[in-house]
Amino acid sequence: MILSLFLLLIPISTYAQSDHLGTVKTNQVLYFGTSPDYFPFSYYDADKKITGIDVKLAEEFANRTGVSFQAVDFAYEGLVDAVSHFQVDLIGGALPLNQIIQQKTDATRIYFDAKYGFLALNAEAVSQNQIDFMRADTIIGVRKGTPFEQYLSTKLIGRGLLPSERSRAYDSWQQLEKDLQSGVINMILLDEPTYQRIFKIGKSFVFEQPAWLSEQFVFASHRGSNLIDEMNRVLGDMIADGTAQKIVDQFGSLQAPFAIKPNYLRPDDNFGYDDVSGTEQACSNDMLLMGIASDPAGPERIRVYNTGSCVWTTSYFVRQVDGYPSAIKRLPVSIETRPGFTYEFTVELSDAESAEQWTRWQMTAPDGRQFGQSIVLQRTIDSVVEETVQ
């Protein structure tokens, strides 16, 4: 029996120093926290590697700073706590400049500022505010596998602004145009460059851009980090020399290597705060992956560390959020785990049929909020037959 332990715990004690940039250069590595669930900014490619616009921008920043680069998968809701607790140096990945980012972190300049729009037969068909949009019976069409489908799935369907049955994804722009003309759909979601390139010349459509249909993204680090000033400087250089635009063009022209589904896991902009009162939660949930013990003839043993201030009760659980299908999608915590203590669970595998298995799990609080570093298992194994918590 061969047992190998891969320690994944990120050193955190040195990040609290005032010269954060100097610490990164001394450690010779930039740890980048991201939630790879938003194409094309941060996602897993066909080889199950984290990539995307934000990842490549952060990697280029590391290269120009003279250090190596490591992307670390975290739950989206746990990114702010991860960088605030010095588990990573920098966070990004379609990260909006919202109240939480502004209050709890130091953020860079806005590096991505996009305004989307609706293509319609007439301007009256386009709702200029979210309330009218939600009340309408409009059916939205979108090009499959594009950033527009990701936006529609996450920011419109995922946030409850658009019922999923009021959306249609198409393999071609030609079919989108045909169904718009025939009334099968009422509008097409796209950006202005795509409108200019495909629909403006020789067409009778209108293109309207409601003010609420936009995205603005930043990178962030812990409060007082001098890494942000350097990141702003390097971002300016990358914009000036064309590197940033090349990265955006490279990924913006790709088609997603997976089916983009409605994303209910990436929450609204008030993550970390109570949905009703807007007040900060009494304690914080955070988790760091300490290691995975891999045994080809036995179960995977995963050990996690409670780095937050909340006690993990038996109402907490580990949830599978992506990857190879399994019969059990959530594994409840069986032993109360206090802050500063570790917890271990196992995933049992069998030899029934060969397959390349890749699964992604995240710790989840009783209220459904996900937090902490993601647990990614990958090896050539056979189908999952049993998963238990110990």
Image (tube, helix red, strand yellow):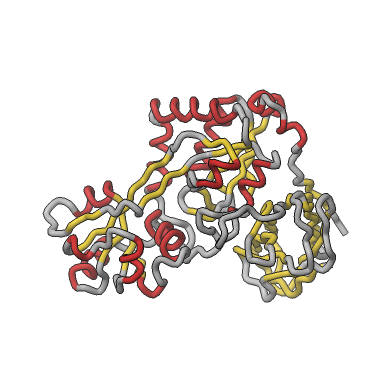
Name the residue located 44 percent from the left edge and 63 percent from the top edge: 153
How many numbered marks does the figure carry?
0
Horizontal side, residue 185 vs residue 169: left or right: left
> Quarter holding the C terminus?
bottom right
Residue 312's image quarter? bottom right
Residue 117: image location, x then y, percent = 29, 54
Q: Quadrant of the N terminus?
A: bottom right
Residue 138 in view here: yes
Q: Quadrant of residue 343?
A: bottom right
With respect to residue 35, does 184 lie above or below?
below
* Residue sitting at x 78%, y 68%: 314
State the residue in front, 117 or 345: 117
Q: In percent of the image, x 68 and y 53: which residue is there?
A: 372
Image coordinates for residue 360, horizontal then vertical, percent: 65, 60
Is residue 348 visible to us here?
no
As drawn, 162 above or below 105: below
Residue 16: x and y, percent?
A: 72, 32
Q: Residue furthest right?
A: 1
Report the front residue among 155 and 190: 155
Q: How far across and how far down the image is residue 193, in percent?
A: 27, 46
Image quarter for residue 138?
A: bottom left
Residue for point 36% across, 68% down: 134
Q: Is 111 on the left-hand or right-hand side of 8?
A: left
